[in-house]
Image (tube, helix red, strand yellow):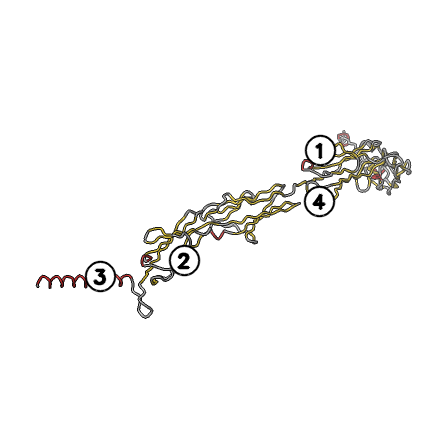
Amino acid sequence: MTIWDKMETATIYLIIFGAISEPVSNVIITLSSNELVEFNSSVSLSCSSSGSPNSFLWMNGSSEVTASDRVQLRGSNLTIVNVTRYDNLPFRCRAFNPVSDDISGPANLSIREGLEYFGPENINLTLSPSKEHYLEGSNITLNCSANSKPSAEFTWFLNGNNLPDAGPELRLMNIQLNQRGSYSCQAFNHRTLRYQSSQPSDVSVLKAVSGASVKPSTDLQVEGTTVNLTCEASGSMLTRKWMKDGLDLIPSDNITLSEEDKVLTFKSVNRKNAGIYLCKISNPVSTAEASYSMVVNYGPEKVQITGEREIRVNEPLKLTCSAESTPSATYRWLLNGTEILPKSATFSKENAEFSDSGNYTCEARNNITERTSSDIHELFVVLNLGDSSPALSPGAIAGIVIACLVVVAAAASGGYYMYRKR
C-alpha cells in the first residue's frame, strides 16, 4: 500500500456569486397610468432592472413605503388604491441582489382634484370676537370650516354633548353662565362618509360685578376694640383691593386681610385708623367699588378748665371746660361737690357773689365709650373796696370781721367792769 492509498480525500465547493448573479443596474419604474383623479383612481408602479435582482424597496420621498389598506406591495410591484394629493411625492425603487444594488430615478404621479369627492380635512373653529373671557349677556359667533367636496355638514358640541344647532355658524346671543364651557364642531361628508372634529375652544362667561358694599362688624367703632370691614359684591372671579384716604392700604401687625382680601380686620382699632376706606372689586370684564367712612370713638381725655382764679364781687364769672373726645363730650359742673347748672362746656354768671368761691369740678362724659374724666379749678371771689384800694380776699375779710368782734367784745367787757365798780 502506498502513502497515497492511506490519504482521505475532501471536496471543497467554491461558489462565486459573480458567476451566478449579474450586478443590478438600470433600475426603471413603469407607471400603469399618470392621469390620476384624487380619491377616484388607482395606480400600479412596476420596478425593473438589468442584472439579477431578487428584492425591492420602495421609497416615497424620504420615507419607506409600507403596506396598508390602501397600499399593496407584491415583489417588484406597488399598487396604490384611491390616490390622494399626498401621494404626489416622488417614488423611487431600489433593487438588490447579494452582490449589488441600484436605485431608480424619481417617478412622479400626476394627480388632479377629483371630479368626485374628498374631505373633510383641515377643519378650523374660530370665535368672534375672540376674547379670553366674555361678559354675561354678550353675543358670540362661532364659525367652523373644512376643506371638503361636497361641502361638509357641521354639528356642534358643548362639553362633549351634542347641541341641536347645525351649520357652519353657531350664534350665542345674550350668553348666560350655563352656556360657558368647551365648544367644538364636527364636519361630515356624506359622500366620502368621513368625519373630522375640531380642537375644542373654551368659552369663559363671567357675571359682572354688582351690589358692591363695605359693611362694618359693628356700627360704632370704639378705640381698643376689634373691628372688621367686609367687602361684599356679586359676580364671578372677584378680586379686591383696599385703599385708605386715596392711598393703597398696607397691612400691618394690627391690620390684616383675610378670605381672599374680602375681610379687613383691625385687631385693636385706634383713632389713627379713622378715615375713608375704599374697596375696589373687579373681574376680567367689569369693576365696581364701595367705601366706608370709619369714625373711631375715644375719650374723653385731657379735660381742662380755663378761666380766672380770682375775681371781685359783682364781676362776671366765666369758666370753660374742654376735652379731647369723639364724639364730643357732654359736661356736668359741681361746686364744692354739689352739682350746679348749666350742663354745658361753659359755666358763667353776670355778677359773682362771695358764695361763688370754691372748687369747681368739670366732669366730661362720652356717651359712646361710656367713659368719664374730670378737672378741678379753684376760684376766689373777693371784696371790692374801691378802685384805689386793693381787693380783700375772703380770708382777709374773715380776719377783719373777727377783729371787729373781738374789739366789740372787749369794749362791752370794760363797760360792764366800770359799771360794777361804781
Residue 351: x and y in percent read 37, 60
State the image quarter where residue 136 is shown: top right
Q: Nearer the viewer, mark 2 or mark 1?
A: 2
Crowd band around label 1 with a 10 angstrom C-alpha radius: few (<14), some (14–19), many (20+): few
User: Quick check: 56 left or right of 231?
Assistant: right
Say what amino acid the circle numbered 1 marks: Gly
**Badge 3 is on which residue?**
402
| Between discs 4 and 3, the one toward the N terminus | 4
Above or below — where is 121 with respect to 317?
above
**Badge 4 is on which residue?**
131
**Badge 2 is on which residue?**
320
Residue 36: x and y in percent read 89, 37
Label of residue 295 in the image: none
User: Quick check: 210 left or right of 130?
Assistant: left
Say what amino acid the circle numbered 2 marks: Thr
In depth, the one of 396 and 52 nearer the eye is 396
Crowd band around label 4 with a 10 angstrom C-alpha radius: few (<14), some (14–19), many (20+): few
Q: Residue sitting at 50 percent across and 48 percent down? A: 255
Q: Quadrant of the C terminus?
A: bottom left
**Mark 4: secondary structure:** loop
State the image quarter where residue 39 is shown: top right
Q: Nearer the viewer, mark 4 or mark 2?
A: 2
Q: CA distance from mark 2 to mark 1?
A: 82 Å
State the image quarter where residue 415 is shown: bottom left
In the orientation shown, which residue stands out farthest toward the left?
421
| Between discs 2 and 1, the one toward the N terminus | 1
**Badge 1 is on which residue?**
160
Q: Answer yes or no: do the residues labelled 3 and 1 have beta carbons within 8 Å?
A: no
In depth, the one of 106 and 345 nearer the eye is 345
Above or below — where is 347 with respect to 15?
below
| Between discs 3 and 1, the one toward the N terminus | 1
In depth, the one of 390 and 131 nearer the eye is 390
